[in-house]
């Protein structure tokens, strides 16, 4: 759920049992498998979705069976409640009904729990964001407000609640990017494994705002250039060296990010175009220009970059993608799609008309919210959210 949506509800007088919401910057891709892994400080997941490419075995694995029955996704073991797997998928067909049922099950679990800390994920609400009209979504969120208020009143001062979203949402209808046909026309061979120099593996699953592509390492630059020319692709990124990523856009601009191995200093080279729109901010902070590009290390500048538009916290998020912080099988090329576009398994479009999606590097997809019955920091990264739980002790609750 995007920050702006919850902030507007709070400004309208809703959810006042919580303090003012804070923006939360997600991972890249801004997708739940990756973001919840970061939020829960869990070991890396095998892929970006439940259908993923296993680099070591050189084959695609997973699919709907993992969604229904569970699989090698360590963050799931850190949850005290998540929607039963048998329901996942159907919640895209009946989003309101399944979201309300999910909310009801959570409340019952919380009431019965003797744990001092209870962590839950309402996956059905992601489906609701994808499929509901704005007025339907507002009504659903107001039901969340009523439910949270009842829980807090029943437990009096004995309960504190932290509510957050692990990513944003574009909140606009989207259409499929013709990835396979477009790459075939450019001479690539979409396959389930890599053999030939022009082979590319493209896992398809949910309808999301990013595309993960796997190829031979020497083909990355060529694949990224062909991919960014497709309609709906905003940016492509690929790992050039161990600590260097190239970013390019459809206007033909090309930039690069480098970092030291301690992760305390970055360099941004925009000689062939300011792809990420960082140069005005870097010059405002008098960032030193070096042979490698703008040198970025001052803490105040790094903080200013966290909520920078149009792409928030790019240095940290791109480095986390490149160094496989949260995903074992990091892709060779990743495409961030423009709002209004998605990619995934075409069969899902038979059942679902998308009203919104997420996954890209853009602001709308990337910035969620967090709010609690105690005051949170003004801005958070997704991996910092649950660290705030310690702040619930000896803090006055919102009125």
Image (cartoon, helix red, strand yellow):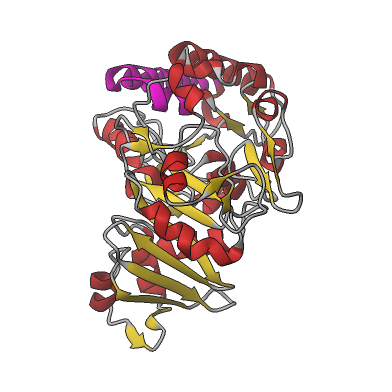
| Image quadrant where residue 52 sits | top right
Return the x and y of residue 326 as percentages of the image width and height.
62, 53
The one nearer the camera, 285 or 232, is 232
Q: Residue at x 51, y 14 (%)?
A: 98
In the image, taking residue 41 as reference, residue 344 lies left or right, namely left
Image vertical order of residue 129 relative to residue 286, above or below: above
The one nearer the camera, 233 or 355, is 233
Q: Dividing the image into 4 quarters, which one contains the N terminus?
A: top left
Return the x and y of residue 79 as percentages of the image width and height.
67, 34
In the image, taking residue 348 as reference, residue 329 lies left or right, namely right
Return the x and y of residue 47 as percentages of the image width and height.
63, 45
Per the rendered image, the range of residues in magenta is: 125-154
Instruction: State whether residue 270 appears in this view.
Output: yes
Instruction: State whether residue 385 appears in this view.
Output: no
Q: Which residue is drawn at 41% across and 84% down?
A: 292
Image vertical order of residue 8 relative to residue 101, above or below: below
Return the x and y of residue 269 as percentages of the image width and height.
36, 77
Q: Does the magenta stretch include residue 357?
A: no
| Image quadrant where residue 253 sits | bottom left
Residue extending furthest toward the right = 57
In the image, taking residue 145 as reference, residue 79 lies left or right, namely right
């Amino acid at each position: 759920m995007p920050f702006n949506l919850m902030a507007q509800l709070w400004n309208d007088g809703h959810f006042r049992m919580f303090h003012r919401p804070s923006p939360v910057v997600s991972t890249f891709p801004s997708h739940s498998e990756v973001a919840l892994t970061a939020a829960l400080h869990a070991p890396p997941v095998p892929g970006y979705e439940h259908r993923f490419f296993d680099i070591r075995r050189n084959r695609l694995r997973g699919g709907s069976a993992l969604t229904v029955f569970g699989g090698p996704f360590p963050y799931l073991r850190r949850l005290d409640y998540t929607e039963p797997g048998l329901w996942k998928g159907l919640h895209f067909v009946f989003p309101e009904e399944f979201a309300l049922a999910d909310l009801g099950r959570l409340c019952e679990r919380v009431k019965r729990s003797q744990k001092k800390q209870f962590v839950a994920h309402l996956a059905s609400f992601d489906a609701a964001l994808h499929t509901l009209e704005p007025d339907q979504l507002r009504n659903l969120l107001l039901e969340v407000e009523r439910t949270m208020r009842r829980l807090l009143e029943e437990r009096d001062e004995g309960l504190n609640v932290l509510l957050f979203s692990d990513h944003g949402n574009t909140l606009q209808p989207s259409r499929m990017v013709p990835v396979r046909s477009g790459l075939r026309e450019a001479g690539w061979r979409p396959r389930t494994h890599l053999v030939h120099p022009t082979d590319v593996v493209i896992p398809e699953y949910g309808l999301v705002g990013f595309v993960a592509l796997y190829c031979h390492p020497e083909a990355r630059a060529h694949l990224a250039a062909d991919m960014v020319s497709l309609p709906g692709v905003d940016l492509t990124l690929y790992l050039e060296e161990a600590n260097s990523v190239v970013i390019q856009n459809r206007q033909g601009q090309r930039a690069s990010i480098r970092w030291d191995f301690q992760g305390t200093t970055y360099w941004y080279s925009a000689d062939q175009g300011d792809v990420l729109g960082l140069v005005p901010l870097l010059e405002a902070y008098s960032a030193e220009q070096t042979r490698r590009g703008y040198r970025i290390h001052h803490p105040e500048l790094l903080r200013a970059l966290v909520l920078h538009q149009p792409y928030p916290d790019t240095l940290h998020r791109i480095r986390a993608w490149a160094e496989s912080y949260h995903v074992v099988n990091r892709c060779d090329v990743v495409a961030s799609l423009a709002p209004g576009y998605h990619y995934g398994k075409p069969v899902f479009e038979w059942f679902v008309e998308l009203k919104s999606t997420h996954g890209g590097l853009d602001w709308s997809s990337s910035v969620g919210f967090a709010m609690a019955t105690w005051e949170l920091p003004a801005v958070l990264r997704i991996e910092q959210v649950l660290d705030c739980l310690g702040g619930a002790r000896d803090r006055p609750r919102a009125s």
